[in-house]
Image: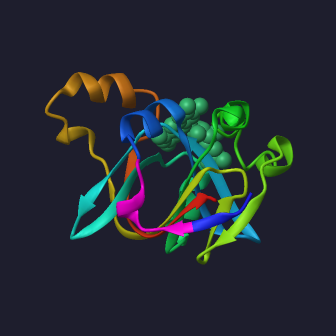
Amino acid sequence: MAFVEKKTAELTVDPFTTIGKEWFLLTAGTPEHYNTMTCSWGALGEIWNAPSVTAYVRTSRHTFTFLEESPLFTVSVFPEAYRKALSFCGSHSGRDCDKAKETGLTPVALAGAVGFAQARLVLVCEKVYAQMMDADCFALPELAERFYQSDLMHKMYIGRILAAFEQA
Ligand SMILES: Cc1cc2nc3c(=O)[nH]c(=O)nc-3n(C[C@H](O)[C@H](O)[C@H](O)COP(=O)(O)O)c2cc1C
């Protein structure tokens, strides 16, 4: 399989299905030193005149450290056949294992960032805005109780899409 670069206007993505149901791998770092994790929360859209991705990452994740240090991150979306690999990357930490080795996924350098050869879509994003979410800002406080009583808060990362790659 080979990637071809597409304009974001050429992509047909239903964000509710792609993010919420299919999930994606969020990856930051360099080919020599990166980490990846599964995400099912996020957004695709437009802000500051740029097609953009928003991801929400708990500060407890190993990937969090990589996101903090990296100017770029990627969103990799996979065919259904890779569901098991995504489940693995969402239930194991890169602190304890090599996720690529365990799943057979192949990291590839794309536009200065790291995606995966088996992905059907990779979005390369430049981090433009990052902000800790704040439990005091909930208009619905029951969500803070439900999601942040025992787990650490999410940090929100907005990245503008620099390049989009789909399989030929
Ligand atoms: C389906 C699924 C969706 C997930 N979505 C998110 C998410 O949006 N944000 C997040 O912080 N963690 C999410 N997680 C949890 C991380 O993927 C998980 O904690 C992972 O092991 C972190 O790996 P790391 O420590 O190598 O970064 C999700 C897990 C699964 C299985």
Residue at 86% in and 49% down: 101
Residue 111 sits above or below residue 129 on the image: below
Which image quarter: residue 113? bottom right
Q: Is 49 or 137 nearer to us in this picture? A: 49
Q: Looking at the rendering, in which quadrant would you find the C terminus?
A: bottom right
* 143, above or below 54, in the image: above
Query: Left or right: where does residue 142 sit relative to residue 97?
Result: left
Residue 97 rendering spot, x and y as whole percentages: 81, 46
Q: Which of the pair 87/3 is nearer the observer?
A: 3
Quarter holding ligand 1? top right
Residue 23 is one of the magenta-drawn residues? no
Which part of the image, by quadrant, shows the N terminus?
A: bottom right
Q: Report the residue that reaches farthest toward the bottom.
A: 112
| Residue 8 inside the magenta-drawn segment | yes
Give the percent coordinates (x, y) of residue 95: 73, 50
Give the magenta part as a residue range: 5-12
Relative height, residue 145 to residue 127 (above, below): above
Q: Which residue lies at the image location 43% right of the left edge and 33% below the top edge?
A: 17
| Identity of the residue drawn at 78% across and 49% down | 105
Is 14 in front, or is 85? 14
